[in-house]
Image: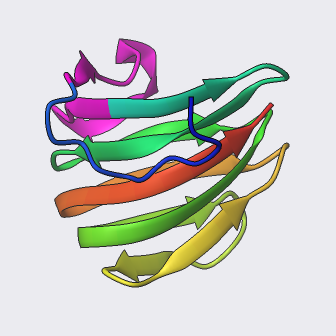
Amino acid sequence: MANHITFDIGGAEPEFGAPEADRIVSGNPQFQTWNLEEAAGGLYAGIWEATPGKWRIAYDEWEYFNVLSGHSIVTEDGREPVHLRAGDRMILRPGFRGTWEVIETTRKDYVIKL
């Protein structure tokens, strides 16, 4: 086994999902996730894509991500909205509470540490 991965999803099967119904604020957002790494100690990495809609998010983990395409707005409770487009990066820390709104179908790569 190599000690590296690439973020190539060719041939990988996505997992399909959606926010929990009680978290949806508007729309009917749907997710596709290509989880490319799942390591001991709670480390995950892959590609995530969501269709338009808005939902509440709450983080108990660290997440770094890079937006590959689309347009989303992430708003922390009590803070100004942050518009995210291709090339934008963000870290969400444990304790983050707010909303994620997908304006145009958004794809990102991510690394999550529990």
Residue at (24%, 32%) from the top-left corner?
32
Identify the image quadrant of the N terminus: top right
In the rendered image of this protein, does residue 100 appear above or below residue 12?
A: below
List x then y, in percent, for residue 99. 51, 50
Rendering quarter of residue 28: top left
**Quadrant where the C terminus lies?**
top right
Residue 68 magenta: no
Query: Magenta residues?
Result: 13-33
Q: Is residue 110 left or right of residue 51?
A: right
Q: Horizontal placement of 7 versus 9: left or right?
A: right
Q: Check if residue 15 falls in the magenta segment.
A: yes
Q: Quadrant of residue 104?
A: bottom left
Q: Nearer the viewer, residue 75 or 92?
A: 92
Image spot of residue 107 (x, y percent)? 27, 57
Residue 43 sits in which quadrant?
top right
**Residue ranking furthest to the front:** 1
Q: Is residue 111 above or below residue 75?
A: above
The x, y position of residue 91, in whole percent, is 69, 64
Considering depth in this image, is 1 or 40 the residue closer to the camera?
A: 1
Residue 97 horizontal/vertical position (percent): 70, 46
In the rendered view, does 21 fall on the left or right side of 46? left
Compare residues 2 and 76 and report the one nearer the observer.
2
Residue at x 21%, y 36% (from the top left corner): 29
